[in-house]
Image (cartoon, rainbow, N blue to C red):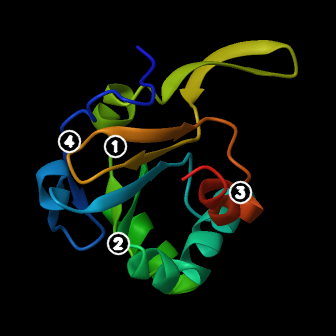
Amino acid sequence: MKLKKGDAAPDFSGFDQDGKKVQLIDFKGKKLILYIYPKDNTPGCTSEACDLRDNYDMWLSKGYQVVGVSPDSQKSHQKFIEKFDLPFPLIADEDKTIIKAYGAWGPKKLYGREYEGLLRTTFVIDEKSIIQEVFTKVKTKDHTNQILETI
């Protein structure tokens, strides 16, 4: 199922890099940028995280929280956050429950080979947990501007 603008954001619950529970309900009354990415410490994922990090204060000033989700472990997230000084939580979704609930798992192609994998996707969610925007073609190095152009 593909989520689209105007849909209710699926409820989620997971644990961040510090073992703290993070849920959609935590953001009720706040705006949220929920970005789902494939893997810590890879070039595209690092570019995307650092772009959001470099603009984090601006996001906060506009009333947005930022949360990342990937299938990596809490330990991997801890190292990624420490290495790149990321100021926002990263949820460890090792069983891909959140990823699948948000439709970010599906068929991919690489060198003509088809397989199931993570589809890099960002959701902009409003104060009432309604999806305002969905980005499936993420510009990892300029993601903040990509989001700003549409909100």
Residue 23 vs residue 16, the one in the foreground: 23
Q: Which residue is mark 3?
A: 140
Judged by depth in the image, the label closer to the viewer, 4 or 2, is 2
**Residue 55: x %, y % from top left:** 57, 79
User: Quick check: 30 above or below 3?
Assistant: below
Q: Which mark is residue 20?
A: none
The answer to which of marks 4 and 3 sits earlier in the sequence is 4
Residue 19 vs residue 31, the one in the foreground: 31
Kindly indicate whether the residue at mark 1 contacts the one at mark 3 (C-beta within 8 angstroms): no
Query: Mark 3 to mark 1: distance in Å?
Result: 22 Å
Query: Could you tell me which secondary element the residue under label 2 belongs to?
Result: loop
**Residue 54: x %, y % from top left:** 61, 82
| Residue at 51% in and 81% down | 58
Q: Which mark is residue 94?
A: 1
Query: Could you tell me which secondary element the residue under label 1 belongs to?
Result: loop
Judged by depth in the image, the label closer to the viewer, 1 or 4, is 4
Residue 45 vs residue 144, the one in the foreground: 144
Query: Mark 4 to mark 3: distance in Å?
Result: 24 Å
Name the residue type under label 4.
Phe
Q: Which residue is mark 2?
A: 63
Name the residue type under label 2.
Gly
Name the residue type under label 3.
Thr
Query: Mark 4 to mark 2: distance in Å?
Result: 20 Å
Query: Could you tell me which secondary element the residue under label 4 belongs to?
Result: loop
